[in-house]
Amino acid sequence: MVALTQARLREYWLLLRLDKPIGILLLMWPTLWGLWMAAEGPPSGYVLFAFVVGVVLMRSAGCAINDYADRDFDRHVERTQHRPLTAGRITPREAVVLAAVLSLVALLITLPLGWATIAMSVPAAFLAGSYPFTKRFFPMPQAYLGLAFSFGIPMAFVAIQGAVPAQAWWVLLANLFWTIAYDTEYAMVDKPDDLKIGIKTSAITFGRFDVLGVMVCYSLFLGIWAMVAFSLGFKPVFWLAWCVALGLVGYHYTLIRNRERALCFKAFLHNNWVGAALFAGLLLNYC
């Protein structure tokens, strides 16, 4: 039995990336988009609590499974070779058990939302758990991750409205393209290492068109959002937020155009503000 010392708990904290919350934030924004659109304003207290806590738990569980799946690859990548599991400071069994416990807690929190919402969470959990293994054979694992990171949107509509209207699926598609864009920026950081060890990523699949691929995905992301906003008659304040997001995307181009690893990583992190800008637009639109 593993003793839960302070040092051990710190290794779990690092394994779950709780010291680097960008992944939680990038999963949180589309979930909040879905909640505010479904409720046409603030959702009820427990629904908001369940989804916010669920995002933190499932993202953390996903990190544990990701490190379990990539433990033999991560030691060959400069950015990941010191992660707790790869470095041997915790065992693979601990990572799997921790992921299972977090997933179970997330399920228990979801129970009061009804069986329809629970049913929607099953494919979301499957996608999140299987994503790390797709990097071995699928040339665009970022698209697979995009599906996993988008399921909070239809889940929010089911929890609040009991159905998933067309606009929810369109926003899911927009978020899928956004995920491909920012995770390709992330993959551009590790591209030299991934080529050596044989990992599949969109940055490798796009090849010399990686920057173009990112910008096309950003364009589709914002274009779909514009279509949804126009069809729903959103207020001018949302369009102001949309223009802010557009400006941020333009800034990202200046960061990634020369493919400098540090600047690509900066662009990836900066996507938090893109998601926040659109959420601010929704928040004000429904006031």
Image (spheres, rainbow, N blue to C red):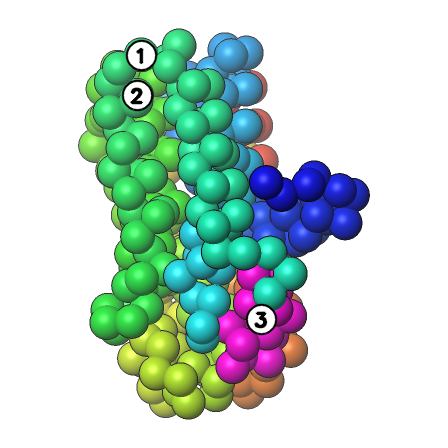
The type of residue carrying mark 2 is Thr
Position of residue 11 measured from the top left corner of the image (x, y, whole percent): 68, 52
Q: Is residue 161 above or below residue 94?
A: above
Quarter of the image where the N terminus is located: top right
Magenta span of residues:
74-87
Q: Quadrant of residue 120?
A: top left
| Quarter of the rendering containing residue 165 | top left
Q: Is residue 66 above or below residue 112?
A: below
Q: Quadrant of residue 151?
A: top left
Q: How far apart, in angstroms, are the residues tagged by discs 3 and 1?
A: 39 Å
Pick the front one: 80 or 46: 80
Q: Observer-nearest residue: 275 or 151?
A: 151
The mark total stands at 3
Q: Decide: few, some or many residues near mark 1? Use Cα within 10 Å; few <14, some 14-19, many ≥20.
A: few
Q: Which mark is residue 117?
A: 2
The answer to whether one can see residue 243 in this image is: no
**Prevalent SS, magenta region:** loop
